[in-house]
Amino acid sequence: MDWFTPFLPALFGGILIGLSALLLLLALGRIAGISGILANLLFGKDKKDFSWRLVFVAGLILGAAIFQNIAPQALPFRESPSTYIIAIAGFLVGFGTYIGSGCTSGHGVCGIGRFSVRSIVATVVFMLAAIITVYVVKG
Amino acid sequence: MKYLLVLIAGILFGLGLSLSQMINPTVVIGFLDITGDWNPALMFVMVGALLVTTIGFRFVLKKDKPWFDSQFHLPIKQHLDKSLIIGAVIFGIGWGLAGYCPGPAVAGLALGQLETLYFVIAMILGIKCAQLIVAKRG
């Protein structure tokens, strides 16, 4: 089983993400899709749903901060790509997840967890698009 | 109590992204680079998360309602449509370009790196533009 040891953090990290999604569904009946939560937090019309979204996003950032305090990762992770690339990428991610009703968490974790056909198709498509993009950019 | 549970859910998500290293765009791009020096570890993030959701969701959704609401709020759309596919393609290109999807980008703000901040600002702009276009087309 030694071959598997390097994959344990990823597996347990995934389990934590799954538990988060499960808890949110159980408590509020909501899907833990980060793009949707963020979009509705910032630009949603229904103000009564503002508070839980804010608390969730705060927890998300807090969780990463707690981890960094317990087990600091060496920063920076990399030499940053140009700000143009970052800005274009960020715009595409925001635009695409809005049009496509979800991202890695909403479609990939929650949607597939419900066996939603839309989410399975979306996940396959955005994974392929990302893989091709990395291939093309690398040249 | 309700908000405490939501906070815990958020924290679990942030911890999971950190522990799994999804928060590190270099690791994400290494995972997407299947023709190069492929790092398959992140596949197990999906495995771990789906292990919990595929089993757990079945039990939760059998309940009449969640603990703190009168109903479940699940996506209504059932059928594939053009916007789902186009949106997924656009999102995938952005994800591959920078190595951030929305969760790690937002959680990554905790690490205080400028590139993450720029990414999130641009992402919010992208959301707003998409919302305006969708609203205009009705």
Image (cartoon, rainbow, N blue to C red):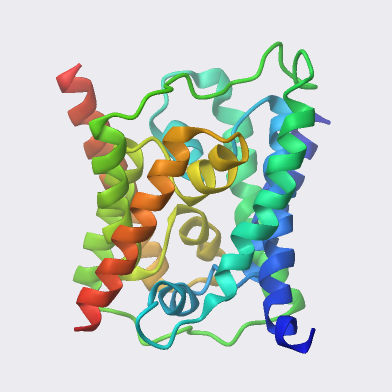
Residue in the picture at 58% in, 47% down: A109
From the viewer's perspective, is B50 left or right of B68?
A: left
- In the image, taking residue B71 as reference, residue B78 lies left or right, namely left
Q: Quick check: A30 above or below A55?
A: above
**Residue B60 position within the rendered picture, expressed as x and y whole percent measured from the top left:** 77, 28
Is the residue B83 above or below the residue A21 in the image?
Answer: above
| Quadrant, the N terminus of chain A | bottom right
Residue furthest toward the right? B1
Q: Is B68 positioned to the left or the right of B43 in the image?
A: right
Residue B6 in view in this figure: no
Q: Residue at x 50, y 24 (%)?
A: B75
Q: Could you say where residue A103 lies in the image, as x and y percent from the top left?
A: 44, 47
The image quarter in which residue A132 lies: bottom left
Residue A91 is situated, as x and y percent measured from the top left of the image, at 26, 53
Q: Is residue B92 above or below residue A67?
A: above
Identified at 69% across, 41% down, the residue is B54
Locate the C terminus of chain A by quadrant.
bottom left
Query: In front here: B32 or A78?
Result: B32
| Residue A117, position as x, y percentages in the image | 46, 34
- Hey, which quadrant is residue B83 in on the image? top left
